[in-house]
Image (cartoon, rainbow, N blue to C red):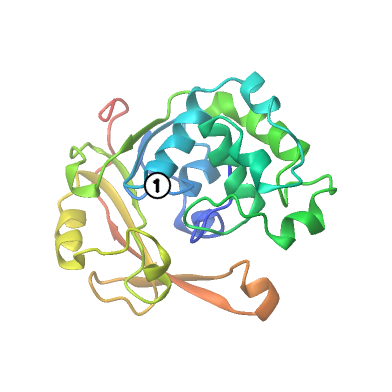
């Protein structure tokens, strides 16, 4: 699958370096755009996020019909046209008319007007609607819940944990105040397989360098983000353990 929406700090490029899930069910406690589960075509995903807007959007994507998607206008001339949509439709469009954000906005970016007549998925349009409709059957067993990480049951599963980074880049998220010592102990206590993502240089877990990726900003400036990971490996989980 391709990303369902653009999101700041998404892990679509990094996901291939992390490798395939080591359990049938994937849990993403800081879901965002859930690009790890998306990249690996995960059949069963349990998504959690503290952002009400992110949860509204995933609930719409999981439970809406293709008719709901195709009913959204393919182009917008003003923010008022987006605000007039149903809430789930709004959330989806707001992440596509101003890309790479951590929260939705109805403010349409110059990028949108530059590419809104293109036939690809760079911005919102017919191609995006087709992508979403084609991929929707693949997320029929996904779940979304608004919750902070510490309230998630300790399932046996593959945990993809991608919190706001403990640096300046991480501070751009609206919910970036995290006790990293508490989070580190929580990550260590998870049942099953665990991958925790960070920028290289983070020290709240013994991270190892993973890869360098070019972000959307990097395509303009040449900047590469240096990604790191901490893994907890356990015996392979039997299918159904996290059902």
Count of marks placed on residues? 1
Residue at 14% x, 61% y is 182
Q: Residue 209's image quarter?
A: bottom left
Q: Is residue 1 visible?
A: no
Q: From the viewer's side, name the closer residue of 37 and 178.
A: 178
Q: Secondary structure at mark 1?
A: loop
Rendered view: 241 above or below 220: above
Residue at 73% x, 33% y is 73
Residue at 64% x, 27% y is 69
Q: Residue 23's image quarter?
A: top left
Instruction: Name the residue tied to disc 1.
Output: 31
Rendered view: 88 above or below 115: above
Q: Is residue 39 visible?
A: yes
Q: Relative to residue 6, is residue 115 drawn left or right? A: right
Residue at 77% x, 41% y is 75
Within 10 Å of disc 1 (Cα), the crowding (few <14, some 14-19, many 20+) is many
Rendered view: 45 above or below 100: above
Image position, residue 52 (x, y; %): 37, 42
Rendered view: 148 above or below 199: above
Image position, residue 4 (x, y; %): 58, 41
Image position, residue 9 (x, y; %): 48, 61
- In which quadrant will I find the N terminus? top right
Q: Relative to residue 79, is residue 101 drawn left or right? A: left
Q: Relative to residue 99, is residue 52 drawn left or right? A: left
- In which quadrant will I find the C terminus? top left
Q: From the viewer's side, name the closer residue of 38 and 61.
A: 61
Q: Residue 112's image quarter?
A: bottom right
Image position, residue 110 (x, y; %): 73, 62
């Amino acid at each position: 699958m391709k990303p369902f929406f653009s999101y700041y700090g998404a892990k679509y490029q990094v996901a291939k370096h992390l490798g395939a899930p080591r359990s049938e069910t994937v849990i993403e406690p800081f879901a965002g755009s859930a690009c790890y589960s998306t990249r690996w075509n995960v059949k069963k995903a349990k998504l959690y996020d503290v952002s009400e807007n992110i949860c509204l959007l995933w609930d719409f994507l999981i439970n809406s019909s293709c008719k709901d998607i195709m009913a959204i206008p393919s182009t917008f001339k003003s923010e008022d046209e987006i605000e007039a949509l149903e809430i789930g439709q709004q959330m989806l469009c707001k992440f596509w008319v101003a890309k790479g954000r951590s929260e939705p906005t109805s403010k349409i970016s110059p990028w949108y007007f530059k590419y809104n007549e293109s036939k690809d998925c760079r911005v919102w349009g017919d191609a995006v609607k087709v992508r979403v409709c084609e991929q929707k059957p693949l997320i029929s067993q996904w779940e979304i819940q608004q919750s902070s990480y510490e309230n998630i049951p300790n399932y046996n599963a593959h945990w993809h944990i991608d919190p706001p980074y403990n640096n300046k880049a991480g501070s751009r998220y609206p919910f970036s105040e995290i006790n990293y010592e508490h989070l580190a102990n929580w990550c260590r206590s998870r049942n099953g397989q665990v991958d925790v993502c960070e920028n290289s240089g983070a020290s709240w877990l013994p991270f190892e360098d993973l890869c360098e990726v070019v972000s959307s900003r990097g395509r303009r400036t040449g900047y590469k983000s240096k990604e790191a990971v901490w893994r907890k490996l356990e015996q392979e989980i039997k299918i159904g353990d996290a059902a």
